[in-house]
Image: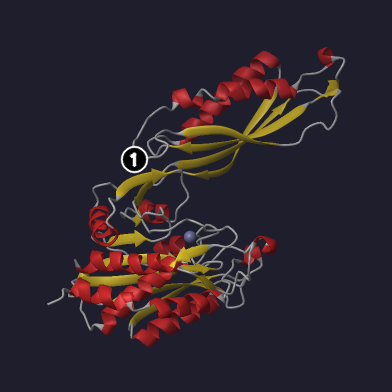
Amino acid sequence: MPTAYEKVAARIDGYRELIIDWQRRLTAIPALDPSSGGDGEAKKAALVLELLAQMGVKEVQVHKAPDGRVSSGHRPNIVARLPGADRKRTLWLMSHMDVVPAGELKNWTGDPWTVRVEGGKLIGRGVEDNQQGLVSSLCLARALLEEKLTPPFDLGLLFVADEETGNDLGIKWLLDNHAVFGKDDLIVVPDGGEPDGSMIEVAEKGILWVKVTVKGKQTHGSTPDRGINAHFAAAELVVRLADLYKRFDKRDPVFDPPTSTFEATKVEAGVPNVNTIPGEHTFYLDCRVMPSYGLDAVIAAIKESAAAVDKQRGTRTEVEPTQRMDAAPPTSPEAPVVLALKKAVKAVYRVEGKAMGIGGGTVAAQIRRKGYSAAVWSRMDETMHGPDEYCLLDNIVGDAKVFAHLLLA
Ligand SMILES: [Zn+2]
């Protein structure tokens, strides 16, 4: 007798044509944020609801985050459930419906909104980010219903809005306004991973972008005594700021790289000619900071270095954070969702899963901030946001089986 997992996995193997059809229909509806000239996710959500209804998912709710910028007046967040034997626990698979714009069309080899199938690859905007996760979770729901199987606990499918532009009308809004998760739930976000499927993302560094404007006094290149060279002062400050690596030097092997990073990046154009000593010099820092450090301490350290340079050179320096995302509390590498994923990834892909931290920026932080454990996992080449974005059909099928394993094995 085949096990429940084996039955469902065999069903999923038969869905390849269906997967291509779903991907085609989803990709043909560009769900773009109004800030990118789009009209939100309402039309795409209608298709997702249609697919859920067709396969017989009965418990479906749409939570509407109000947004006056789109024609529907809201951003839809869909919560669907398939009841299990134990209704007090849920395996959640969360994907987002919105996509990023196609970018320069000349960099694509075809129309971004028309899926092309080349060998085992599907090509189109959104096929990987995040329709791979969206479609693989639909596959699991359909297989369970076709097998008329009641899983040991609930399967929850979450299709959220507004992931690409900050989550304010997506998962963040949903968690602020509705009780969705329970404390024993397993929460998987299939929206990031490695080509071999080994990475289980559990932690993120804090992100801090800082604009540093050094002000001196402009003068002619031949008379430095009459001015204060802001470029020299800024250069000295940049060198001092490299010491942030020593000051915030905690290591954690979960992360790659295993330390905080503090990098001087962008420089704003200063004086256009060679024979002017600049009175102002502006540069930026990109800091990725271990969760155990507060970002305020990093900002204070930057200001301290700036004050030291100002004192020596007579400059005035402004330190201004332009982007800050404090790290969410990490998910433990021993959390049930991580251990279950390791087993499932091994069973389906024959790969050792590894709990890892990254430089920041996944939607799971929103969930972790509310006190729930969540793992970001999928098997993907990470072509997201680029031209000719693609996903592998094999990965959609395989990921759906990994989710089946989490629920049934
Ligand atoms: Zn995504």
| Quadrant of the rendering where the N terminus is positioned | bottom left
Q: In which quarter of the image is residue 224?
A: top right
> In the displayed structure, does residue 98 sit left or right of residue 138?
right
Res 331 seen here: no
Q: Is residue 403 above or below residue 215?
A: below
Circle 1 SS class:
loop
Q: How is the image coloured?
A: secondary structure
Quadrant of residue 229 within the rendered picture: top right
In depth, the one of 254 and 96 nearer the eye is 254
- Measured as percent of width and height from the top left, residue 97 is found at 49, 69
Image quarter in which the C terminus is found = bottom left
| Relative height, residue 309 to residue 57 (above, below) | above
Residue at horizontal 84 percent and vertical 25 percent from the top: 274
Residue at 55% over, 68% down:
124
Mark 1, residue position: 254
Q: What residue type is labelled 1?
A: Val
Residue 385 x %, y %: 56, 58
Q: Which residue is drawn at 61% across and 64% down?
A: 101
Does residue 88 appear to the left or right of 135 in the view shown? left
Residue 406 in sight here = yes
Above or below for 255 versus 309: below
Q: Position of residue 22 (x, y in %)?
A: 46, 78
Number of dots carrying numbers: 1
Q: How crowded is mark 1: few (under 14 residues within 10 Å), some or many (20 or more)?
A: some
* Farthest-out residue, left: 1
* Disc 1 residue lies near ligand 1 with CB under 8 A: no
Could you tell me residue 327's position as x and y percent? 42, 44
